Image (tube, rainbow, N blue to C red):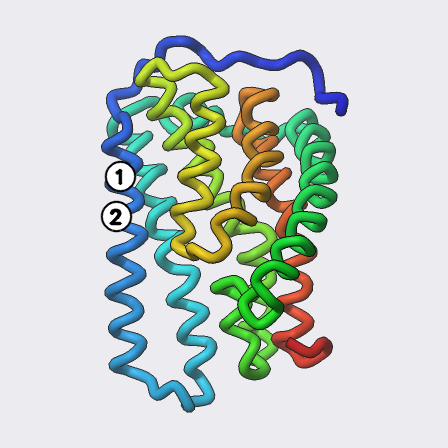
Amino acid sequence: METTGPAVADPPVRTHRWGFGAFLFVFAVFVLSAVVIGALITAAASPDSPSSTTIALVGTMVPTVLATAAALLITRLRGNGPAIDLRWSYSRDDIRAGLKFGALGLVCTTLAAVVWTNMVGEENASSAVGHLVENGRMPIAAAVALFLFVWLLGPICEEIIYRGLLWGALERLNWGRWAVFTLTTVIFAVSHLEPLRTSLLLVIGIPIGLARLFTGRLGASIVTHQVNNFLPALAVLLVAVGAMPA
């Protein structure tokens, strides 16, 4: 598959003052905030309450956003900001490359999802987000918010954390580009904390990581991730509003 221009190598030496510990801190923010918010939700709302699904939606989105904010703050306080430290960009070249890798990802992940679903069974094939809508309809506003989060905002947040902060931390340890690609893909899959879906998440992460590897920019991997998430996000939206069975 053609890529947009030649591969762009990341600079061999990083001048920022953060490393792998920064990623561990950000991941801790994600896990701890998820635990705290989950406990508060459990204490404040009955599972049968009409608002329970919406509250659970907030509990799904907020930890990711908090972790992303922590990552961006680290680059401000301990580095040169996200544009330099995380190779943040969102140019036309990023969009073109992201669409190409995203198309490849859609083919690969669709085939992988079919095989994986046949292996684990449809009753076990729902993601953590899918479980939010499989037991009933959501308010329209909540359903649209979930759709936009899964399709657009979630990929931006995850790419900042994994192909931005984690990628830069491993580079600072002088890992080779392919080693960085491999480890970030594995950690991306495992860090979703969905053991049954880890193998599928590995396949999903490959084209996203390749976009980052071959362009040297975060924008391309963000677009790839967004393209990959569009159909699952649309399916969740349709189930959430009752237009499609769970």
Image quarter hosting the C terminus: bottom right
Q: How far across and how far down the image is residue 6, in percent? A: 67, 12
Number of numbered discs overlaid on the protein picture: 2
To which quarter of the image does residue 57 belong?
bottom left
Question: Residue visible at 31% across and 31% down?
Answer: 76
Rendered position, 239 above or below 51: above
Rendered position, 239 above or below 235: below
Question: Residue visible at 41% across and 89% down?
Answer: 49
Kindly identify which numbered label has been placed on residue 28: 2
Task: Name the kind of residue labelled 2 in the image.
Answer: Ala
Image quarter hosting the N terminus: top right
Q: How far across and how far down the image is residue 46, in percent? A: 35, 88
Question: Residue visible at 64% across and 29% down?
Answer: 94
Q: How far across and how far down the image is residue 138, in percent? A: 56, 79
Q: Nearer the viewer, residue 220 or 31?
A: 31
Q: How far across and how far down the image is residue 123, in percent? A: 57, 72
- Label 2 secondary element: helix
Q: Mark 2 and 1 residues: CB-CB less than 8 Å, in contact?
A: yes
Q: Nearer the viewer, residue 231 or 55?
A: 231
Question: Residue visible at 29% across and 54% down?
Answer: 31
Kindly identify which numbered label has been placed on residue 176: none
Q: CA distance from mark 2 to mark 1?
A: 6 Å
Does 125 sit left or right of 77 as displayed? right
Task: Name the kind of residue labelled 1 in the image.
Answer: Leu
In the picture of the structure, the residue carrying the numbered disc 1 is: 24
Rendered position, 181 above or below 158: above
Rendered position, 105 above or below 182: below
Does 105 sit left or right of 199 as displayed? right
